[in-house]
């Protein structure tokens, strides 16, 4: 066989084994997002081979520097508090798992859902919400700090992986899903990406799924971490209907289980209840509003929601966590340390930008221009830090070591 004939044979076999990108989305519902009809990327690129545009987005996110850093950014507990608590990385993987399950169940685009879920926390600061609140306060006179906007900045500009552009150059639909919240002021500056916040329109079904999957994941896994840490007790949780119903059901089915096994059995039942209810309620909404396209989804009311009864139960769990976990004195102590570290770093860098790595020092421009750009560069630097890197930077700047 000649080399030419062998190459043609290999090509023919590959075509049979690997479906074309369009075939990978043929099964989707009419209201699903399809990469073939994407609103596009900021910088035009040749279409990918043997994968869809949204699969390419997912792959770029997984290979990004910001995604790797999530391993050492925490949810509630500071990273060094223990090895078994959730990090932003494990949380993002759990959100992606829940979101993909829902997307498959509703015949919408799993790859887009996964990309949004994996990217939604890329812009989070070290030390969870305490770090974010502290950085927002530091940036109060400089446009503020929102982690959703920071996630967008990461994928649009801050990642440095490709020769032709800054950022990851993701599809519009992926970027839209990452931007879960946005003030009207910021929305006006974002062009088409911010229009839905100004017009009262919805994002794709896939973005709506990723949004609710995020809440399902962090509420239930914060319960797990709270119990593991001893900050919450099973006796306290008895007052939460969503928990107690499934706790008692687990004991009825397995009367002899206890400890961690009983906790895990209860948590998985609660998550399953939330997912099944969300899928069922969403199906009813889809039948009621009958969207026939992605544009019809954008014009409809929110479609991916829980039933009223389960939404009330989920809200009660969220309120319980706010009162008993997030405001627990030990968590408040950690939050206070986090605010001190973030505020101290920002103040030191603002007072003397020469303390910053060169890439985060404003270029030699006028004082007026530097006054605008330098605070945002500091925010980018701090937001990109892991918990342990922020603690190390704080020590290097402020600690006096005689050795």
Image (cartoon, rainbow, N blue to C red):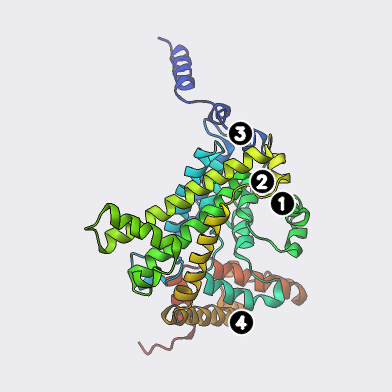
Q: Is residue 352 above or below residue 296?
A: below
Depth check, front residue: 142 or 394 = 142
Residue named by callout 4 = 352
- How busy is the neighbourhood of tag 2: few (under 14 within 10 Å), some, or many (20 plus)? some
Residue named by callout 3 = 47
- How busy is the neighbourhood of tag 3: few (under 14 within 10 Å), some, or many (20 plus)? few
Label count reads 4
Residue 195 located left or right of residue 313: right
Residue 32 located left or right of residue 395: right
Q: Nearer the viewer, mark 4 or mark 3?
A: 3
Residue named by callout 2 = 172
Label 2 residue SS = helix
Q: Residue furthest left?
A: 256
Task: Check contact, mark 1 vs mark 2: CB within 8 A.
Answer: yes
Q: Nearer the viewer, mark 3 or mark 1?
A: 1
- Asked where in the image residue 47 lies, by quadrant, the reply is top right
Label 1 residue SS = helix
Task: Check contact, mark 4 vs mark 2: CB within 8 A.
Answer: no
Q: Nearer the viewer, mark 1 or mark 4?
A: 1
């Amino acid at each position: 066989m000649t080399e030419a004939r062998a190459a043609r044979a290999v090509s023919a076999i590959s075509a049979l084994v690997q479906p074309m990108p369009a075939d990978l989305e043929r099964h989707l519902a009419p209201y699903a997002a399809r990469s073939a009809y994407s609103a596009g990327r900021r910088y035009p690129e040749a279409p990918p081979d043997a994968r869809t545009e949204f699969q390419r987005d997912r792959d770029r996110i997984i290979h990004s520097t910001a995604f790797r850093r999530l391993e050492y950014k925490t949810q509630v507990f500071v990273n060094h508090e223990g090895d078994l608590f959730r990090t932003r990385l494990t949380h993002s993987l759990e959100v992606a798992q829940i979101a993909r399950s829902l997307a498959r169940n509703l015949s919408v685009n799993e790859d887009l859902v996964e990309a949004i879920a994996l990217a939604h926390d890329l812009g989070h600061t070290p030390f969870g919400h305490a770090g974010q609140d502290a950085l927002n306060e530091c940036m109060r006179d400089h446009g503020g700090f929102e982690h959703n906007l920071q996630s967008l900045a990461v994928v649009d500009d801050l990642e440095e992986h490709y020769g032709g552009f800054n950022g990851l150059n993701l599809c519009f639909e992926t970027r839209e899903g990452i931007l879960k919240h946005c003030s009207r002021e910021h929305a006006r500056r974002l062009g088409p990406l911010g229009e839905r916040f100004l017009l009262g329109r919805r994002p794709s079904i896939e973005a709506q799924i990723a949004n609710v999957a995020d809440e399902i994941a962090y509420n239930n896994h914060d319960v797990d971490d709270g119990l593991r840490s001893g900050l919450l007790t099973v006796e306290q949780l008895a007052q939460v209907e969503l928990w107690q119903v499934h706790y008692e059901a687990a004991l009825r089915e397995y009367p002899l289980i206890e400890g961690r096994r009983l906790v895990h059995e209860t948590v998985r039942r609660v998550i399953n209840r939330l997912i099944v209810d969300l899928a069922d309620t969403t199906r009813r909404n889809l039948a009621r509003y009958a969207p026939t396209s992605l544009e019809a989804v954008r014009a409809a009311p929110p479609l991916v929601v829980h039933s009223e009864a389960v939404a009330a139960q989920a809200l009660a769990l969220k309120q319980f966590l706010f009162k008993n976990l997030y405001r627990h004195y030990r968590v408040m102590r950690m939050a206070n340390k986090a605010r001190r570290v973030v505020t101290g770093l920002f103040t030191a860098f603002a007072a003397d930008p020469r303390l910053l790595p060169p890439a985060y020092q404003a270029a030699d421009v006028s004082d007026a221009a530097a006054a605008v750009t330098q605070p945002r560069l500091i925010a980018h630097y701090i937001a990109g830090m892991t918990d342990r890197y922020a603690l190390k930077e704080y020590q290097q700047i402020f600690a006096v070591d005689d050795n």
